Image (cartoon, helix red, strand yellow):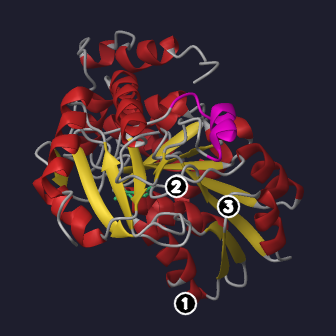
Amino acid sequence: MSEKKDREWQYTLTAHDAVDERHHGSINMPIYQTSLFAFESYEKFQEAAKHSQTHHVYSRGNNPTVRYLEDKLAELEHAEMAKCFASGMAAISAAILSAVKTGDHIVCVDQAYGPTRAFVTQYLMRFGIESTLVDGSSPDNIRAALRPETKLIYLESPTSMLFQLQDLTACAELARSHGIVTIMDNSWATPVFQNPLEFGIDLVVHSVTKYISGQSDSVAGVVLGSARLVSRIAEDEYMLLGGIMTAHTAALITRCLRTLPLRMERHERSALKVAAHLASQPYVLRVNHPALPAYPQYELGMKQMNGTSGLFSFESAESPEKMRQWAGQLKLFKIGVSWGGFESLVTVNPAFAGCAAEARSLIRLHIGLESADDLIRDLDQTWAQVCDLQL
Ligand SMILES: *Cc1c(COP(=O)(O)O)cnc(C)c1O
């Protein structure tokens, strides 16, 4: 992107640790496979129990392997504190629950991740918490939806089907001026390309399952923000709902974190190459990728993000049936949900609100770590095989 911030420090942060003599200089954080921690004296036990978030008492609380990962992620996301969870949804639901109570109201972007929307608009209704879904592309829409009882604005920028952005500075200022908490899902950009806390967002959540893992072998989540907000979540939702990350998962994710900046640069470069190629293909109406200059919110993306990841979509006037034929014959793209791993993926959906008027299909691609030229060849050759089909 135009004025790339220097990201070199991210490489040092993810690759380097000071020698830790408590672990005999082990170059990796050991896996603390333990449920509880024992003490030499009752005094020490009582002292630790008083501070169970900073001391090690029980692994549904503070496990050293998990804490190591939390501290790394906090530094990368410019947060005072992080808490890791069993999944992205465990992190998201815990963060949302920490911000609302019966009688409160939530404003949520209408393109947010489906299960997040279901949690906000359906599940929380049971507890008397109301919500309004809004088109987040303009802060005016968010302002118009505010009520005196609004306690939370939930953002996801970019969204993961149409890649719509929200103006983070404007949303954070609006929320602050009304005493409202903001939570943002930053899974798409990762801390490598976007740091929402720097724009005044209160809490950031990630599906660590996606890029931070990047190996498609773990399900995990994290909440990051100020020590005040995150320690409250650690004491309440983390301890009481119990959706914790295990030491084994933390060790796996720590391995993955070593290569996060490296992988993100590769995803960015390859996805841009494929997206730019697709923009000129006859079966493509419109490519939804925030770093293409034709993208309607390109300028905002440049301002807020330091780079872009490997997931984007395109719209086609061809039928979903025909595009599914095409997707099924691709050799290098697997058909499957999720994204963020080493592998390229494809899904085909019927066009929906927000797509171009002539669009019949919305195709989402995840560009993995394969050769971008090979991927482009696969897309083109497969299209040549199905383009005459009358579907
Ligand atoms: C996958 C995903 C989630 C949920 O994460 P899990 O780890 O699957 O629970 C949340 N937000 C976005 C944008 C996602 O893509």
Q: CA separation, marks 1 and 3? A: 25 Å
Which residue is located at x 34 percent, y 9 percent?
Answer: 19
Q: Is residue 298 magenta?
A: yes
Image quadrant in which the C terminus is located? bottom left
Residue 126: assigned label: 1
Residue 164 location, quadrant: bottom right
Q: Amino acid at mark 2?
A: Thr
Which residue is located at x 46 percent, y 47 percent?
Answer: 187
Vertically, is 258 above or below 77?
A: above
To which residue does mark 2 refer? 159
**How many tags in the picture?**
3
To which residue does mark 3 refer? 136
Label 2 element class: loop
Residue 120 location, quadrant: bottom right
Left or right for 136, reference 312: right
Q: Residue 366: in sight, yes or no?
A: yes
Q: Position of residue 302 (x, y in %)?
A: 64, 32
- Answer yes or no: do the residues labelled 1 and 2 have beta carbons within 8 Å? no
Q: CA separation, marks 2 and 3? A: 10 Å
- Is residue 378 or residue 297 the one in the foreground? 378
Which residue is located at x 48 percent, y 72 percent?
Answer: 352
| Region of the chain picked out in magenta, as a range | 296-307
